[in-house]
Image: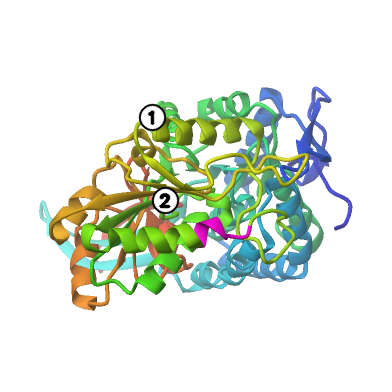
Amino acid sequence: MSTIEGRLFIDGEFRDARSGRRYEVINPADESVIAEAADAGVEDVADAIEAARRFADGSGWGTDHEFRKKCLVQLQEALRERSDDIKDLLIAEAGVCVSNMATHVDVMVEGMDFFNGLITSFQWEEDLPPFEILGNSSGRRVRYEPYGVVGAITPWNAPFMTAIWKVHHALATGNAVILKSAPDTPLTAALLAQVVAEATDIPKGAYHAISSADKAIVGDAMTADQRIDLYHFTGSPGVGQRIAERAANGIRHTVLELGGKSANVILPDADLDMACGLGVAMCMSNSGQGCALATRMVVHADIYDEVLTRLEAMITNLPWGDPRDPGNMVGPIIREEQLQRIEGLVDRAVAEGARMLAGGKRGQRYDRGFWYEPTLIADVDENAEIAQTEVFGPVLSVIRYEGGDDEAVRVANNSRYGLSAYVQSTDEERAWAVAHKLRAGTVNINNSFYLSPDAPFGGYGISGDGVEHGVAGFREYLRIKSIASPAK
């Protein structure tokens, strides 16, 4: 990996925070210091917003579709060339296992084709037929225009994936964008800025990267500033609600992709080899640190014991450890505080009567780093804390149900979350019937997965508002204007 950049990127230039403060970025696998990052304050946020606002209001970026497409194709090509550096950095600062890199990097970069194509294929203007009202016959033109300045705020669990979604999509739609990365993972945003500066013709003022040791200070400064038109956030429901409340001052638009407690419904006719294998993989991927992962398995009583036997064998023997080892599915937890949170949730679940079948404790394989063993908890009550709370760690909770498919749906829908859901059945018609009733923004039947650049991704309930991806996600970054003129 080349020299790691940790400075702020504002108005086309790398610079330190005005205060000169920096903070250490820690590798969660061994607690070593990877690099230092600039610790921005409210004055740095103001500088970035001023530059972004000036660019959005004074440039032709929003209307020059051909130039934008050229720039963003350059970005895609450059990210392909730097993919090894991106992957090395994700392992170092986020503990992402190399086994997850296809999803976190390769699929994301290749998926840029979809939005790059929309830059020139999207119907930016549409003429409606004449309409007569009040004695006047008027033609109407519907026009899509960028909001102007996008404030993008990303989490630590998938720093490249979520950054490229927001930065690329904001730029593709003609906006300027300010990216505030999570305190734990600021280096990916700075690497993205390096690529923008060194390998593309993206003008200065279009992209800005802000890092800060205290997420609240910089986040509140961004959401308080009326010069930002749209906030695009991925993170917890609590923070998402705060952003929405602050954005309501000035009626700014928000798109919020929040947490999940996704149910995986195992119907009694499911292929158990596939259902259990997928169920473990879709819970433990990325060390369980993913918002749409299947962390709540809802299993019919007729197959409950057999499912538990299979899950116990799989999870007990699930490879975990060094994220650089391609054989490992579970790597480190991001930091000590998150590790303590996982411990508390699991310990309380057992104290309340759930049965521990695998894991349930810190990993002791290494002297340093933040590790939690892949964990299986059975006999979980559907209303228990562990069944209702996003753990964000390698923990699978299993809930038993009796009765028909409507009861399975009721248990699955017994959550304030609704980001994703899963259903396993050998009867395709039956699976689709259940999928239609699940209250979630995405549903996955058997060995399928929703994630793709052309399919909208959003949540029900406290899992979000608005969508990413697809034409619908493209439109989230655009205002609609209707212009009337005398009909000809």
Residue 143 appears in view: no
Residue 317, magenta (yes or no): yes
- Return the residue at label 1: 248
Image coordinates of residue 488 in percent, x first then y, are: 25, 69
Q: Relative to residue 198, is residue 220 drawn left or right?
A: left
Image coordinates of residue 262 in percent, x first then y, are: 37, 51
Tell me where residue 73 sits by quadrant. Answer: bottom right
Front residue of this view, candidates 24 and 266: 266
- Return the residue at label 2: 295
Residue 195 appears in view: yes
Front residue of this view, candidates 8 and 261: 261
Segment colored magenta: 314-319
Picture layout, residue 84 above or below residue 363: below
Say which amino acid is labelled 2.
Thr
Q: Relative to residue 177, is residue 236 drawn left or right?
A: left
Q: Quadrant of the N terminus?
A: bottom right
Front residue of this view, candidates 454 and 116: 454
Residue depicted at x 20% and y 55% = 409
Classify mark 1: helix, strand or loop.
loop
Residue depicted at x 35% and y 50% = 398
